[in-house]
Image (tube, helix red, strand yellow):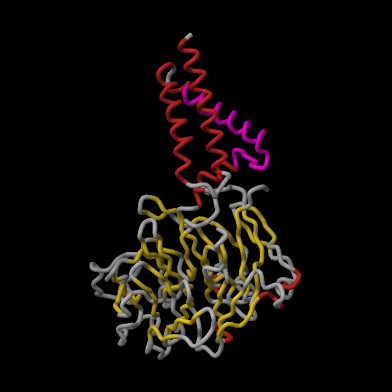
Amino acid sequence: MKKSVSLFVALFLMSAGWAGAFLLAHNPSVSQSYWLIPALTIGMSIGLCLRFINGKKTALALTLTAAIGMATVNHFFPDSRVSVESVRSLFTGVNTQGILRQVKVDNRYQTAPFDKPLILKSPVSLDLSLFTRFPAGVDDFCFSDDKTLYASLPGLGAVYRFKKSALDVPGGFELFLHSLDNPTGLACETDQLLVSESSQIKAYPYVGGAGDLLVGQLPDDGGERGHRLQQVSDGLLFSIGSRCDACTEEDPLRATLQLLNSNGQLQAYSRGLRNVGGLAYNETEDSLWASERSRLYPEPGAADELNRLQLEGDYGWSLCDGSGTADAPGSPCKDTTAAEVLLQSRSNPAGVMVTSRLDYPMVYRNSLLMVLQGDSKYNIVPAVVRLQLSAGKVGVPVAFLGGWDGKTTRPSAIHPGPDGAVYISDEINGAIYRAAWLRAD
């Protein structure tokens, strides 16, 4: 009698634990600490089962109670739509069936190329929409504390901003700064916007007015003129690209990452970085990530890279490649740091972001998302890929979102929004795409 009652309690707890786990997995906004409840419940029930039945029967009980938990959730919470395939997607981040999604476009934005349906593809259940559209291609963007989106438009030498509530403004956007010299990287602080130009970085108050010079006299003698900005606890990090494809730089600022500390002093952070396409700081692990475009010649060029940046780290360019071996005869590479992930040559990595702030299921909230702009000459199409982070290690790139053709549409920067969705800019059309988790399919 005691054995039967104990087994009944164990199976009940196991079913309840599975039901709780399924509910949490389909509710992305809950705190990760709540996962301790179903984990402990299932763990206790497994231990109780093993006292009275063998391992094979316990495994069978796990399977049966998972089915019971799934049926219970679907009965009382039909919007959750729990299935074997959805569980696979939620807990592994992989859906074997690619999902074709049409990007929702408001009537006021339906001019070429959005006068025709834009179909993107993802193994992840995403709700895709065109959030806003600016007059020219967007290089970078950020959100201020009041949820206003600021976007750099290098082709117009301008920065625009978009307020969702500004319905009286045609298109919803307004010009914020103009007559700038190749504005690229942006960073939104509490009361000011940081803007990088070819030879300087300035801070502009959101209320308007002249900007304060933070960094001046940056190298502007050809080569890479764009910069990427990233705020960290020690100050502001910004990249300076190389002057050439493969050469010995005369200017020590070239091909480096610089830190402007809280005292206004400038110091080298990392070097040997040919062209940083995106920067992202992971506060949880205190890690800094940079996507890098490697040399292009001789064709097809060296492997592009994802680097985990360290203070005073040397990442090899131009004498050593991302694997830490000589890229030129006789080059000493033993003191350089190899790339964390080697990417296909000409994949052209751009923006990168950490997913911890997303309103997505937990498996997606410990990853990096990275834009690969591709290369039409080599038939490499643009895409956004996901790389899982676990115990300080990064996984291989897996598909997250694709379908841009690289000629009429091409993604550039990627950032989390204040609503927990992923936002992606388009450097050809000035579009900002929004990718939110689709709760019910």
The image position of residue 390, as x and y in percent, is 40, 50
246 sits left or right of 29 in the view: left
Please determine whether, in this image, residue 439 is positioned above or below residue 251. above
Q: Quadrant of residue 130?
A: bottom right
Taken as a whole, is the magenta stretch helix, strand or loop?
A: helix
Q: Seen in the image, is 92 located left or right of residue 273?
A: right
* Horizontal and vertical percent position of residue 87: 56, 41
**Residue 188: x %, y % from top left:** 48, 73
Whether the magenta-drawn stretch holds residue 325 is answered as no
- Outermost top residue: 1
On the picture, is 162 further left or further right than 298?
right
Give the residue displayed 66% in from the left and 34% down from the top.
76
Image quadrant where residue 225 sits:
bottom left
**Quadrant of the image occupied by residue 223:** bottom left
Considering depth in this image, is 391 or 306 the residue closer to the camera? 391
Rendered view: 361 above or below 210: above
Instruction: Reply yes or no: does residue 83 show up in magenta.
Output: yes
Residue name at image x 46 percent, y 78 percent: 194
Span colored in magenta: 58-85
Q: Is residue 280 left or right of residue 314?
A: right
Query: Which residue occupies the foreground of this view, 156 or 161?
Result: 161
- Residue at the spot 74% in from the left edge and 72% down from the top edge: 110
Looking at the image, how many numbered discs can be counted on the residues? Answer: 0
Q: Is residue 94 above or below residue 407?
A: above
Where is residue 203? Give x, y as percent.
45, 81
